[in-house]
Image (tube, rainbow, N blue to C red):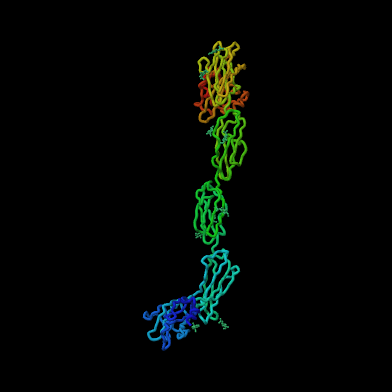
């Protein structure tokens, strides 16, 4: 029979080769639902030499096997005296004489969890406390076997267990909250292990990311009783990132701040990071991350990628951050000096976002075409002095404008102006030579008959020269005998010779034949305003013998023939050129009021035969300006 026992309880028992020793077979662990019951199967052996006389008795103890420690008595076959907490709850199902110590405990409470020991009393001194025990676990809810890791899209089995060791009551198992699971399958099974029975129900389905966090429940109940036990679990479904949300591509102004958000849907939370190109700017282990950019510069423009990686998968999403800014100061060529006839290409480049338009302005006026490119090239073919000036490149976008300029100075060979001539004056002949050129021409007079070059202030010829901008004026006066012919003209030819680095020209000056009066008033620079007034005025020349009566040169000298006055001639050679050959074009000087006395340069003024004049409209107030002009 002992061999039979061993075969019946093969897994349960710790077997010593002990058929004739004190031995016991009981389950190491057994469980029961609260308020239900449990049967602890038990068989024992005693040494074969012992012959029980008065039958066999036994005691079940709780916690400790040794009577001297006074453990609570669970059951005692000799008397009915048991510990209070087991009163009315225990019954020995086995027959001790059959070495069957099977025990029923009913109406179990949590306090009954613990170790149960059996002590056999075979008669006389043959009493023995078996050290082996059964550990009872009292459950108030069923156990659910959950895999350590639940991964989405992989088949999942969840098993719920209910102990089935109470003969009067058979549990049933139901899964709860399975309505929305995809194709759930249930399979029920009775397991016997170590002589204890367990009912199980296995739920099989394939979880999806959406099932992460979902509640599932297992309910154990005993039909025809009110006993119901439930256990709820929340599914922890691991899934790779299935979405990476980032801000839509956006535009920000330079200098402002911007925060880029990223949120990754994954379980567990990913290692989340913001990349700018190849560079990782920020990372964290979280479901979301915010990248703050302060004082944004154009260098911050570009593609930002948020990457989520949680070990189950990796995913990224990108956005484009555009940085808006007003145009930067355009880069243009340096100011330059070029020779007339040169062709040039002026470059203007800048950056701005959105791309600025580029416009070329010359002295404030539009030239060329407006481009919406990063580079605008202004082509100037065969430049003329007319195109000398300030060239400005203007860059504009909706956020602002910026400009840069350069000056182009056009250089050219001297050009003689028409008003160059010799005029008969009272005491001789006066020759004036006016030329423009850049650099300003140097003027000399050459008297070929005398083989004399006059280029320096010289008492004899009253050489005078003056330069104003790109215009040079030179004058000489020939008064000595040999220098004047009978007709009043110069006895010698007078050449005006002018040159600068680009050219040299020598021209024979004509003697003006008209009986005009000539006078030159040269008004010097008006310094601060950078406008140079250049006035040459002529007054009637009174011939040798018919000097006018009433002449009072020191008083209210006015210029008789306004048509001969030079108006304020601008520095601009363009204007000068225009006047070449159009003597009648010179506009009368309307008013001298704008010219302050101290700014007049009288150094070389010579008045010849000036005479007073009344009623010169519009100039009466500044007659005094002329009071200092010497009259000869
Ligand atoms: C012990 O007794 C119980 C209850 O009567 C019985 O179910 C069980 O089969 C017996 N065990 C052995 C080994 O006979
Ligand atoms: C529950 O009780 C009903 C009658 O009351 C009976 O028909 C049924 O078999 C019982 N179920 C169980 C599991 O004992
Ligand atoms: C990004 O999205 C968050 C949340 O929607 C928002 O607060 C933030 O302003 C957005 N940032 C940009 C640059 O659009
Ligand atoms: C961002 O993540 C933190 C934890 O990392 C969390 O507390 C917060 O609620 C999340 N914010 C959003 C908008 O998901
Ligand atoms: C983003 O994902 C694509 C493929 O989905 C991959 O080619 C790319 O390298 C990823 N970018 C980053 C910054 O991880
Ligand atoms: C202006 O600058 C550009 C580029 O810097 C150059 O290619 C071009 O020749 C320059 N133009 C002149 C007239 O110097
Ligand atoms: C161009 O010339 C003007 C005066 O004519 C001057 O004020 C300005 O500074 C010059 N610009 C450059 C770029 O040299
Ligand atoms: C003119 O004078 C120079 C010296 O001043 C002299 O060398 C030259 O031979 C002279 N020419 C004539 C034609 O007399
Ligand atoms: C005048 O001409 C002579 C000879 O060409 C030269 O040496 C001198 O420097 C000139 N004087 C002036 C003021 O230009």
- Tag count: 0
Q: Residue furthest bottom?
A: 54
- Residue 89 seen in this snapshot: no
Between 507 and 208, which is closer to the camera in this rendering?
208
Left or right of 283, for residue 412 = right
**For this view, does 25 lie left or right of residue 324?**
left
Q: Is 71 or 562 nearer to us in this picture?
A: 71
Residue at image location 62% in from the left, 27% down from the top: 578
Q: Nearer the viewer, residue 218 or 396?
A: 218
Query: Where residue 329 sits in the image (x, y, percent)?
Result: 54, 40
Residue found at x 58% / y 35%: 346
Question: Residue 233: x percent and y percent?
Answer: 52, 69
Looking at the image, residue 118 lies above or below residue 500? below
Whole-percent x, y for residue 517 in the image: 59, 18
Task: Return the residue nearer the eye: 221 or 607.
Answer: 221
Q: Is residue 387 above or below residue 258?
A: above
Asked if residue 547 is positioned above or below residue 173 in the image, the reply reads above
Task: Say left or right for 591 vs 30.
Answer: right
Query: Where residue 99 appears, x then y in whole percent?
Result: 45, 84
Quadrant location of residue 445? top right
Q: Is residue 601 above or below residue 158?
A: above
């Amino acid at each position: 029979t002992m061999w039979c026992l061993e075969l019946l309880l093969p897994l349960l028992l710790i077997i010593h080769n002990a058929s004739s020793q004190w031995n016991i077979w009981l389950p190491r662990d057994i469980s029961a639902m609260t308020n239900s019951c449990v049967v602890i199967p038990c068989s024992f052996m005693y040494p074969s030499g012992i012959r029980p006389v008065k039958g066999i008795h036994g005691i079940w103890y709780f916690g400790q096997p040794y009577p001297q420690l006074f453990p609570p008595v669970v059951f005692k076959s000799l008397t009915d005296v048991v510990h209070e907490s087991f009163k009315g709850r225990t019954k020995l199902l086995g027959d001790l004489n059959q070495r069957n110590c099977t025990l029923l405990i009913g109406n179990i409470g949590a306090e009954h969890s613990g170790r149960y020991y059996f002590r056999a009393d075979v008669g006389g001194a043959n009493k023995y406390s078996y050290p082996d025990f059964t550990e009872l676990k009292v459950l108030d809810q069923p156990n659910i076997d959950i895999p350590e890791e639940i991964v989405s899209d992989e088949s999942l089995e969840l098993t719920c267990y209910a102990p089935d060791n109470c003969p009067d009551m058979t549990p049933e198992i139901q899964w709860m909250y399975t309505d929305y699971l995809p194709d759930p399958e249930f399979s029920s099974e009775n397991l016997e292990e170590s002589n204890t029975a367990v009912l199980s129900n296995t739920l099989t389905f394939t979880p999806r990311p959406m099932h992460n966090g979902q509640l599932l429940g297992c309910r154990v109940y005993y039909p025809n009783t009110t006993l119901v036990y439930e256990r709820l679990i929340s599914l922890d479904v691991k899934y790779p990132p299935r979405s990476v949300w980032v801000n839509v591509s956006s535009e920000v102004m330079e200098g402002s701040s911007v925060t880029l958000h990223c949120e990754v849907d994954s379980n567990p939370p990913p290692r989340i990071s913001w990349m700018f190109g190849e560079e990782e700017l920020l990372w964290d282990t979280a479901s979301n991350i915010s990248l703050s950019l302060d004082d944004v510069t154009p260098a911050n423009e570009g593609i930002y990628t948020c990457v989520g990686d949680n070990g189950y998968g990796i995913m990224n999403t990108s956005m484009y951050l555009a940085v808006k800014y007003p145009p930067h100061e355009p880069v243009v060529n340096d100011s330059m000096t070029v020779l007339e006839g040169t062709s040039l290409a002026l470059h203007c480049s800048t950056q701005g976002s959105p791309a600025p338009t580029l416009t070329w302005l010359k002295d404030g006026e539009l030239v060329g075409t407006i481009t919406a490119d990063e580079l605008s090239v202004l082509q100037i073919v065969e430049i003329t002095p007319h195109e000398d000036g300030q060239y400005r490149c203007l860059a504009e976008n909706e956020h602002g404008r910026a400009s840069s300029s350069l000056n182009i100075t056009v250089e050219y060979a001297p050009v003689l102006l028409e008003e160059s001539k010799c005029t008969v004056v009272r005491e001789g002949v006066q020759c004036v030579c006016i030329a423009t050129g850049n650099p300003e021409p140097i003027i000399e007079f050459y008297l070929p008959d005398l083989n004399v070059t006059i280029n320096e202030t010289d008492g004899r010829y009253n050489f005078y020269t003056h330069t104003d901008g790109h215009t040079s004026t030179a004058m000489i006066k020939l008064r000595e005998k040999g220098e004047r012919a009978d007709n009043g003209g110069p006895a010698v030819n007078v050449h005006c010779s002018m040159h600068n680095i680009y050219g040299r020209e020598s021209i024979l000056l004509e003697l003006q034949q008209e009986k005009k009066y000539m006078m030159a008033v040269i008004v010097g620079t008006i310094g601060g305003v950078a406008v140079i007034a250049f006035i040459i005025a002529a007054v009637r020349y009174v011939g040798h013998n018919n000097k006018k009566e009433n002449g009072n040169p020191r008083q209210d000298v006015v210029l008789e023939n306004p048509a001969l006055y030079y108006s304020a001639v601008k520095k601009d050679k363009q204007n000068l050129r225009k006047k070449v050959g159009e003597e009648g074009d010179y506009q009368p000087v309307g008013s001298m009021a704008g010219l302050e006395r101290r700014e007049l340069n009288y150094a070389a003024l010579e008045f010849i035969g000036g005479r007073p004049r009344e009623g010169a409209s519009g100039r009466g107030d500044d007659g005094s300006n002329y009071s200092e002009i010497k009259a000869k």
